[in-house]
């Protein structure tokens, strides 16, 4: 499921829990919303990394991300997810 779908599903669950006075369903809804927001943030980060690393085989973009304080393990994961390197 996409992040937006999880957020919407969570809102529905939370509202249903509030109507039914069901604390467990309400908590599940809040959890689903949080998961959806994390998925959205991760997708946004991958998209930004792809855009930032698009120039000159990505060298300038990767250096910029590192200088901005993105931890090396995160950069390595992003490198793998974006296909890294030159695609000429």
Image (tube, rainbow, N blue to C red):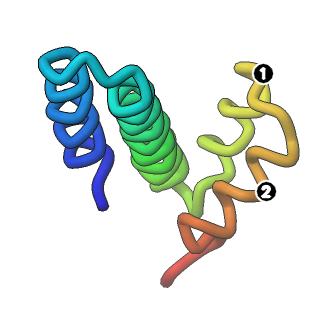
State how far apart marks 1 and 2 are (Cα): 13 Å
Q: Where is residue 18 in the image (x, y as percent from the top left)?
A: 21, 16
Q: Name the residue under label 1.
A: 69
Tag 1: Cα neighbours inside 10 Å, few (<14), some, or many (≥20)?
Answer: few
> Circle 2 sits in a helix, a strand or a loop, which is it?
helix
Where in the figure is residue 17, as x and y percent of width and height?
Answer: 24, 25
Evaluate if marks 1 and 2 touch, with contact meaning CB atoms under 8 Å apart. no
The picture quadrant where one finds residue 86 is: bottom right
**Viewer-proximal residue among 16 and 56:** 16
Name the residue tied to disc 2: 76
Residue 87, compared with residue 47, is above or below; it is below
Q: Which element carries disc 1, helix, strand or loop?
A: loop
Q: Mark 2 or mark 1, which is nearer the start of the sequence?
A: 1
Does residue 22 lie above or below 44 as drawn? above
Q: Give the quadrant of the N terminus.
A: bottom left
**Residue located 13% across and 18% down the image:** 19
Looking at the image, is 62 positioned above or below residue 56? above
Q: Which residue is drawn at 60% across and 55% down?
A: 58
Q: Residue at x 34, y 33 (%)?
A: 25
**Residue 32, horizontal then vertical, whole percent:** 39, 38
Q: Could you say which is closer to the camera, residue 64 or residue 41?
A: 41
86 vs 17, left or right, is: right
Residue at left offset 58%, top offset 63%: 57
Residue 41: tell me if it is visible. Answer: no
Residue 26: horizontal and vertical position, in percent?
34, 24
Task: Write down the quadrant of residue 40 in the picture.
Answer: top left
Is 21 placed left or right of 83 in the picture?
left
Is residue 18 among what the camera can see?
Answer: yes
Along the line of sight, the residue nearer the viewer: 30 or 51: 30
Q: Disc count in the image?
A: 2
């Amino acid at each position: 499921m996409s992040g937006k779908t999880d957020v919407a599903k969570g809102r529905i669950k939370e509202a249903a829990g509030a109507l039914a006075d069901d604390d467990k369903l309400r908590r599940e809804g809040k959890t689903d919303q949080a998961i959806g927001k994390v998925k959205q943030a991760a997708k946004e980060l991958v998209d930004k990394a792809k855009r930032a690393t698009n120039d000159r085989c990505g060298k300038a973009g990767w250096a910029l991300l590192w200088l901005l304080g993105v931890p090396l393990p995160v950069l390595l994961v992003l490198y793998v997810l974006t296909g890294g390197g030159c695609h000429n």
